[in-house]
Image (cartoon, grey):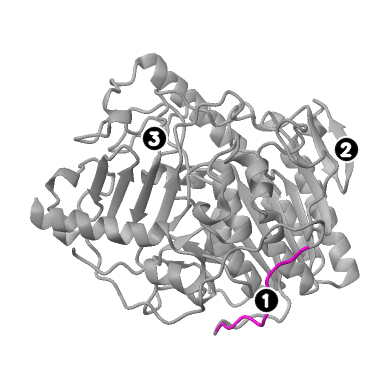
Amino acid sequence: MIAAVAGAFSAGSPAPAGRPASVPAARSGSSASGAALAPAQTTSRRPRHPNVVFVLTDDLSMNLLRYMPQVQALQARGLTFRNYFVSDSLCCPSRTSIFTGNFPHDTGVYDNVGRMGGIRAFYDHGNEYNTFNLALQKAGYRTAMMGKYLNGYLQGPKRSPVSNRYVPPGWSRWDVAGFAYSEFHYRLNQNGRIRRYGDAPGDYLTDVLARHGTSFINSSAAQHKPFFLEIGTFAPHQPYTPAPQDANKFPGLVAPRSPAFDVLPNNPPRWLSGHHPLTQSQINTINADFRKRVQDVQDVDRLLTRLEAALSRHHELKNTYIVFSSDNGYHMGEYRLTPGKLTAFDTDIHVPLVIAGPGIPAGSTTGALAENTDLAKTFEGMAGTFKPCDGHSLLPLFHGGIPKHWRNAVLVEHHGPATSAQDPDQQNAASGNPTSYEAMRTPGFLYVEYQDGEREFYDLRHDPYELHDLAGQLSATQVGRLHGELLRLENCHTGRACWSAEHVSGTP
């Protein structure tokens, strides 16, 4: 088994020279103080001012894609990332990494609520002046944010440092909801005016977002200006509320049964070790919840259809990058866990990323490691702008394959356990609620270090479902090498440092 452990390590490539590291821009007064912008450098051929439509779902796991024909059609005419991961399998840290291109250790957002979480931590650390939309707006883009933003928004002064009418800098249009997980009975801040929605069929949030998104495309096309549109759905987050017309679809559907379903890894960490086999009642609930999640994403699929139809009407489809992804994954029965997230297992950190648009070959794929920290730099590159961040542009991957000297490691950071009753992602022990950890995911292995000193190591080439923890078989030298490489990732700050740290050197 020691040989298997050694074989799991990926040979690293020398990190190319890059920009000097810099720290994120600090929040100051009411004026943006973002970094200076310069032309992006890329070999990808693209129109000078392409549009971007970004649909970001909530808790959408890989096993839901087979039920989304419009996403499959997007894959057929675009690029599918087979190894795309998130910096934390939790909403606010992940979304903050998307907005800024930075890891949680640079954004200061580690949770959904409290001093280190949600919109409060986002603003306390000045992240609203370090987001990609500011760069795009400076480049002449109309920018729109719709749907889900950050936890705590529109929830009053006790949970948010900004007023309910506040619109952050860098957005031309703002149609953002508060606590809208039920899809009905919510409020939208629409460019500073609060509107309440009820329980009529037309108030279903995903449909409302489709209407607003279509309206924004129409107005942008009429002004002949390039545009960026982000729509953050609350679907398929619990309580998994489908659109009324989808509520009875997929009768009899049950949750997938992967080899990890209702099975513990050997030598599980303490937070997981006490889990007994799932009861029949728990399995019945998992099946019912999975069916509702499949029903829930049907309207997300229709949203994509409506946005593409609007682009086609204005002859903008060929000049628009359409990006589809999720803020984190979701486990449902794997590792004897009831529905939830927060873990370092692939069920929770491995999520979809599909991009179609100008110059991208139809039906292409890439196995290159990518992370949500890369999206900000990618969006800026599409618009021909640039600012420092921890992430790396994905533009060099737009023709598929893996370029020489590409990274071979990504970082996952999680602070836990989540215990606040105000957190919509609070989980009990049955769902899995790990202690704080830092993790390194490569093509060949997953290595996890917990705050309490525990470690996990999975050889993904021989154990793709992460069922055989080999941490106890690592030598002191191997542990030392892994710890040192993970420490470099934990302490990188933008540009050259992070790109270098993401090139692990190989077998310790």
> Relative to 296, does residue 382 appear above or below in the rendering?
below
- Residue beneath label 2, please? 194
Question: What is the C-alpha distance between the residues marked 3 and 1?
Answer: 39 Å
- Residue beneath label 3, please? 435
Q: Position of residue 440 (x, y in %)?
A: 34, 55
The amino acid sitting under disc 3 is: Thr
Q: In this view, does 295 lie to the left or right of 185?
A: left
Q: Is residue 197 left or right of residue 120?
A: right
Question: What is the C-alpha distance between the residues marked 3 and 2?
Answer: 38 Å
For the point 59% across and 71% down, which residue is it?
Answer: 388
For the point 59% across and 56% down, which residue is it?
Answer: 98
Question: What is the C-alpha distance between the residues marked 1 and 2?
Answer: 33 Å
Q: In this view, does 491 lie to the left or right of 28?
A: left
Q: Please tell me the numbered disc located at residue 25.
A: none
Query: What SS does tag 3 mark?
Result: loop
The amino acid sitting under disc 1 is: Thr
Q: Position of residue 492 (x, y in %)?
A: 44, 63
Q: Where is residue 251 in the image (x, y as percent from the top left)?
A: 52, 26
Residue interval drawn in magenta: 32-42
Asked if the stretch drawn in magenta spans residue 114, the answer is: no
The amino acid sitting under disc 2 is: Ile
- Residue beneath label 1, please? 385
> Relative to 496, does residue 267 appear above or below in the rendering?
above
